[in-house]
Image (cartoon, rainbow, N blue to C red):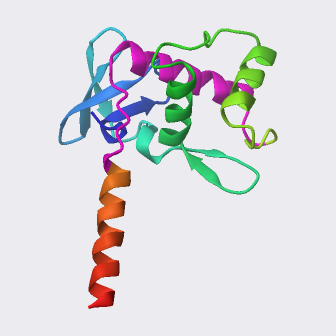
Amino acid sequence: MGLDKILSISGKPGLFELVAKTRNGFIAKSLIDGKKIPVNIQNNVSMLSEIAIYTYTEEVPLKDVLKRMHEQAEGKQTIDHKSSKTELESYFSDILPEYDEDRVYASDIKKVVQWYNILVSQNLLEFTEETDETNSEVNEAETNSANN
């Protein structure tokens, strides 16, 4: 499952999966306990695929940060999100050394670590080289058509 179906809902702990749309919003299922809840349009909802982390040069998509965490942890869970602020910041600077320390707060790091651990525990993180292969094929096709 892609990150475009995984949601963070303000005021609700954990992550949710988009299950169905309704007239006034949608139904979401908690990835922690599996309970389904109605979510109103007025709730502040973010899709994980649309979240990025500030760095000094650009914004890095959350998917890329999660991929780095996944590689470092070898597909297993990482440090606890309840670790100290110092431990979390140290860990995050190992993952993303160029993150903007003035705009990325300890609470943001805590959320990312918690989300990563939830996604790993539910086997929802899959990183394939499919997009790289697709890009290579497109570039090769463009090169071949330009040469003809």
Q: Position of residue 55 (x, y in %)?
A: 71, 48
> Where does the image place residue 97, in percent across and percent down from the top left?
74, 38
Task: Pick the residue in front: 29 or 2.
Answer: 2
Residue 60: in sight, yes or no? yes
Q: Which residue appears at 76% of the width and 24% of the height? A: 89
Looking at the rendering, the stretch of residues picked out in magenta corresponds to 103-130
111 displayed left or right of 137: right
- Name the magenta segment's main secondary structure: helix
Q: Is residue 112 left or right of residue 130?
A: right
Q: Is residue 57 magenta?
A: no
Q: Work out whether residue 106 or residue 126 is closer to the camera in this orientation and state it.
A: 126
Which one is in front, 33 or 125? 125
Eyeballing the image, is 76 above or below 5?
above
Give the left or right position of residue 54, taking residue 4 as reference.
right
The residue drawn where x is 34% and y is 17% is: 31
The answer to whether any part of residue 47 appears in the image is no
All told, the count of numbered labels is 0
Q: Position of residue 64 (x, y in %)?
A: 52, 41
Residue 5 occupies quadrant: top left
Residue at image position (48%, 16%) is: 117
Vertical arrangement, residue 121 with respect to residue 57, above or below: above
Q: Quadrant of residue 68?
A: top right
Quadrant of the snapshot with the C terminus: bottom left
Residue positioned most to the bottom:
148
| Vertical order, 26 against 133 (above or below) | above
- Whole-percent x, y for residue 144 in the image: 29, 80
> Looking at the image, which residue is at 40% across and 21% down?
119
Looking at the figure, which quarter contains the N terminus?
A: top left
Q: Magenta stretch containing residue 118, yes or no?
A: yes
